[in-house]
Amino acid sequence: MAEIQPVRGWRYNAALSAHIDDYVSPLFDVVSAKQREALYRNELNSIHLSVPRGQDPAGEALARLTQWQEQGVLRQDEMPGIYVYYQYFRLPGSSREYCRKGFMCHIRAYDWAENVVLRHENTLPAAVNDRAELLARTQFQTSATHGLYRDDAFELEHYLDEAIADPLYQTEEDYQGARDVLAVIQDAAIIRRFQQVLGEREVILADGHHRYEGSLAYRQARIAAEPGNSGREPWHFHLMYLTNAAADDLRILPTHRLLLELPDGMADAEFLTRLEPYFTVLPKDDIYDLPELIAGKPWAFGLYIGGQAYKLRLRPEAHEQLSWDTTPEVKALDLTVLHFFVLEKALGIVGPDAQRTWPGVAYVRNFSECLSRVDRQEARAALIVNEVTMEEVERVCHSGAVMPPKSTFFYPKTIGGFLFTSIRDDEHDNAFYAPHLAPGSGL
């Protein structure tokens, strides 16, 4: 199903790659203002291409890219390949070192209706347009989106492990505490096997919905302008980091909900009263026990309000009241239950569209930050949630529906600047766009 192609990657030159930590950057949608300013001070940091600024941000990015290519700051690899990308990381409170194994390549930018690349969240048009404009001007991809394929036999991991033993470079520690390692596979027979394995599978988009839709929008514009295109031009493709959904090292962290306000001057006691028809509301002595108390329990949440902790558990008979027009797979999610029964029924924020734009809710990944912001009276209440499972993501994607906002936080995030790719027309001459390769031939 999914067509992938190796790429001739663009990378920082050898001297700069030896200090790659100085040049990589967080994804554009997870960069804080403080991080941005620190990164912008480095004139060669990749953030100048991925999150450009100025009167004409896309034009600024193009000018800088052209300069970097002419000066040799960025160099293109001579041979195409599939780029192996490992991320070594630890989770808070755990001594175990995880290793998320994957690879970067080009994937055809399929429309959602083709059901090859599947989404699990909606996007904001303004953010998609921003990404599409940047891509149209630079024809350069600065950070890979994250896609998931399922291979319970783990066939490709053998090739990945062999390649990573001879890395091109690695970070000491990126902004989130992970160690990122890059290697490359350039053997034609192995690359063909990667293409065959992915050619039998769908891909779930884990992270990067706006960047992917930006590629879709640009591709659609080029098709409209060039109806005689062959379908093999580089602009049909998109840079993606692919990992195996069957792997134990694929981690999804919870994103808690912070209620910045309660509508209509609602008092804490009234809010609790409004919850009681739908939830059992149990006071708890220690707020720090809540994550353990709700772990693994469906439709269970922690609530911290007015200095008091509560465990919430949906009354089973209440679930049939969930009347949103969506699939059973979405209705079964904890976060759907929370958004319907807390935000809509208790707080009166009716419907997913109104909730998506309501300024009274914030999304916070750090448990302690949730508590401290309530204690500092920056928020009225914190709703503590369990993480979404990979199985739930797969069920929702295959149902054709999307999850509530900020349902998944795949950890760690990929980083920008580790590998760049071009989709300019002159890339079309590269051998990897040949539809057939003779066994044993070089690429």
Image: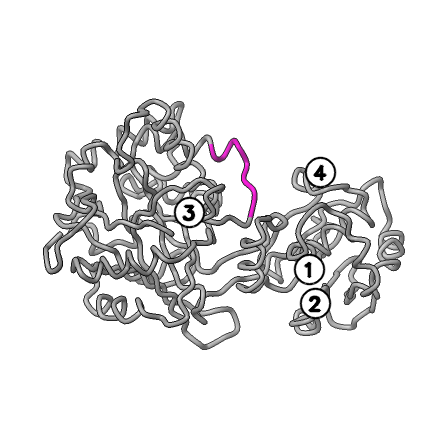
Disc 3 residue type (three-letter) = Leu
Residues rendered magenta in the picture: 121-128
Residue that label 2 marks: 298
Q: Is residue 106 magenta?
A: no
What percent of the width, then of the height, locates residue 282? 83, 69
Residue that label 3 marks: 27
Q: Can you tell which quarter of the image residue 382 is in?
A: bottom right
Q: Secondary structure at mark 1?
A: loop
What percent of the width, then of the height, locates residue 78? 12, 48
- Cα gap from disc 2 to disc 3, whole angstroms: 32 Å
For the question of whether residue 196 can be seen, the reply is: yes
- Cα gap from disc 3 to disc 1, whole angstroms: 31 Å
The residue at the point 41 percent across, 53 percent down is 146
The residue at the point 28 percent across, 26 percent down is 228
Q: Is 353 drawn above or below residue 229 in the view shown?
A: below
Would residue 338 appear left or right of 29 to someone viewing this image?
right
- Cα gap from disc 1 to disc 4, whole angstroms: 21 Å
- Earlier sequence position, callout 1 versus callout 2: 2
